[in-house]
């Protein structure tokens, strides 16, 4: 069979599928949205900043919007009220996940707690995460570890301050978070906190996040799956394979050395070895759970970078209300100190409002037709919850583009999935299980950086010169690295 025959066959199959979808949607009251073009639907409207493009379209078509992206019906939620309807009132109907083709590499979607359907295996893994890894007691027990890694970050910045060198905040935060995770899971550093060692592993993790965030034709035209025209799944197969091999070796190493005696605490491998719940989880699930923890745990790096960027740009850091007069200049922030620093917690909330780590959260999927506010969400539709648009909704947030932490000083709005005006970690049964770690780690890192140094931009640039453009992907990054010079106090 020659190449032309294959292409013609695919086009014929695609046309049949397209016709079937049109017929199956006939007679249903779909949510409003732009009129789709043949074959491409509304793909041409997304651009390179889909979260922004869909927010603009929602202003025209409404908070519940339907688009055809290629051959995939896509529902976009753009308001707190509609997010509550979907993520709380009808959470079970919207609890499935639309797994991108990239995570079909090594069948990751069959093992990962992120992509598994809500069933027995998923419940077992979530129970392990909630009760044994991200529980309050477990996080309290590992507080000394987080403090040690933050101290290493401050020491690195102090070394730069002595020479006047700028710190790449993203790289520095990545090293700190990487070692925190590797110590939490395997009781060892994976990179030197003062250099760019373990460069290959860091590049692997970044490449996984990069490939997972790329628009993939296969996700819009499933008939192209076998062709993998952009090679995304092929590259992910290589990246996943290397990381899984590394994790397998680390697990073997930890298993051979036995339990850790790290100041009387245990690591994740100990937990997974001892938990009654994990006795029903095989080695493959443990390796893939480690992969979930690394990729998910590193998303908060961008939150720290955005918070530092907004601080440098706006100078909203109020010394009299923040750390230096409360816990003492130059001291490290701890969990106990954070409780005494409400303005710092407001800075983190404001950063997450404006720059949610995952702008669309992780796409949901409906297995059956679902009625939402009188409209039909068709079976097999993917569902985007545009957390970026919700956090910038002027009907909820006055002057939404202004970085104004004090808006939370008298507010009870929380970010743990109860208040739908602010859902950077999602909500409902699919809320990110690592939210408890993120709300502890980010304020400690941010408070320590702000309490230990003053900061200025590299090359004497002024605050107004700081580029705040976004780079869309699986996480929302700064388009350009934040290069800031720490000034000794």
Image: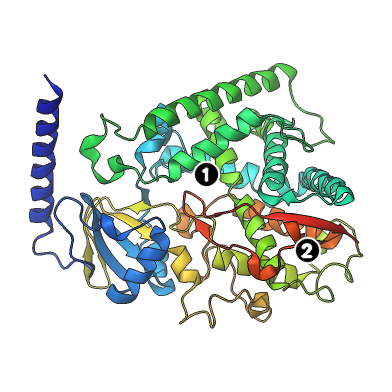
Q: Callout 1: few (<14), some (14-19), or many (20+) C-alpha neighbours within 10 Å?
A: some
Q: Quadrant of the N terminus?
A: top left
Picture coordinates of residue 439, whole percent (x, y)? 66, 58
Residue identified by numbered label 2: 338
- Residue lying farthest to the top in this orientation: 256
Q: Is residue 129 left or right of residue 169?
A: left
Examine the rendering and report whether any part of residue 437 can be seen: yes
**Contact (Cβ within 8 Å) of mark 1 with mark 2:** no
Picture coordinates of residue 67, whole percent (x, y)? 25, 61
Q: Quadrant of the C terminus?
A: bottom right
The alpha-carbon separation of the residues under discs 1 and 2 comes to: 28 Å
Picture coordinates of residue 125, whole percent (x, y)? 51, 39
Report the number of numbered marks: 2
Residue identified by numbered label 1: 126
Residue at 76% x, 49% y is 140
The nearer-to-camera label among 1 and 2 is: 2
Displayed quadrant of residue 193: top right
Q: Callout 2: few (<14), some (14-19), or many (20+) C-alpha neighbours within 10 Å?
A: some
Q: Secondary structure at mark 2?
A: helix
User: As displayed, is residue 353 above or below residue 179?
Assistant: below
Picture coordinates of residue 154, whole percent (x, y)? 83, 49
Displayed quadrant of residue 290: top right
Q: Is residue 46 left or right of residue 299?
A: left
């Amino acid at each position: 069979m020659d190449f032309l025959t294959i292409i013609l066959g695919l086009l014929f199959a695609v046309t049949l599928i397209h016709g079937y979808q049109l017929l199956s949607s006939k007679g249903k009251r779909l949510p409003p949205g732009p009129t789709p073009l043949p074959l491409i639907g509304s793909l041409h409207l997304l651009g390179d900043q889909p979260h922004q493009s869909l927010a603009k379209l929602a202003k025209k078509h409404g908070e519940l919007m339907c688009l055809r992206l290629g051959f995939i019906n896509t529902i976009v939620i753009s308001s707190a009220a509609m997010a509550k309807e979907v993520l709380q009132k009808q959470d079970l109907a919207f609890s499935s996940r639309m797994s991108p083709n990239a995570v079909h590499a090594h069948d990751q979607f069959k093992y990962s707690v992120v992509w598994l359907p809500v069933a027995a295996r998923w419940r077992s893994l979530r129970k392990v995460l909630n009760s044994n890894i991200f529980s309050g007691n477990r996080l309290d027990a590992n507080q000394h570890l987080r403090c040690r890694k933050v101290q290493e970050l401050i020491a690195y910045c102090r070394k730069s301050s002595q020479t006047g060198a700028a710190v790449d905040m993203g790289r520095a935060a990545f090293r700190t978070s990487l070692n925190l995770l590797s110590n939490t899971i395997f009781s060892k550093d994976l990179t030197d906190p003062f250099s760019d060692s373990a460069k290959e592993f860091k590049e692997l993790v970044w490449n996984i996040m990069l490939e997972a965030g790329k628009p993939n034709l296969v996700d819009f035209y499933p008939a192209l799956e076998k062709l993998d025209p952009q090679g995304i799944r092929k590259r992910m197969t290589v990246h996943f394979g290397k990381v899984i091999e590394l994790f397998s070796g680390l697990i073997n190493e930890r298993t051979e050395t036995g339990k850790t005696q790290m100041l009387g605490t245990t690591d994740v491998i100990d937990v997974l070895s001892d938990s009654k719940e994990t006795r029903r989880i095989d080695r493959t699930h443990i390796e893939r759970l480690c992969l979930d923890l690394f990729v998910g745990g590193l998303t908060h790096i961008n939150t720290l970078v955005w918070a530092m960027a907004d601080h440098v740009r706006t100078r909203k850091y109020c010394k009299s209300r923040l750390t230096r007069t409360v816990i003492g200049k130059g001291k490290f922030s701890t969990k106990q100190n954070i409780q005494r620093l409400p303005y710092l917690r407001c800075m983190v909330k404001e950063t997450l409002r404006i720059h949610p780590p995952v702008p669309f959260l992780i796409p949901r999927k409906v297995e059956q037709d679902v009625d939402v506010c009188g409209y039909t969400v068709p079976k097999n539709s993917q569902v985007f919850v545009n957390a970026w648009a919700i956090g910038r909704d002027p009907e909820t947030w006055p002057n939404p583009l202004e970085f104004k932490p004090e808006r939370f000083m008298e507010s009870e709005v929380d970010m743990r999935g109860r208040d739908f005006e602010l859902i950077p970690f999602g909500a409902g049964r699919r809320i990110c299980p690592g939210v408890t770690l993120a709300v502890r780690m980010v304020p400690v890192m941010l408070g320590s950086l702000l309490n230990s140094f003053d900061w200025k931009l590299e090359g004497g640039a002024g605050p107004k010169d700081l580029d705040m453009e976004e780079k869309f992907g699986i996480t929302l990054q700064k388009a350009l690295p934040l290069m800031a010079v720490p000034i000794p106090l």
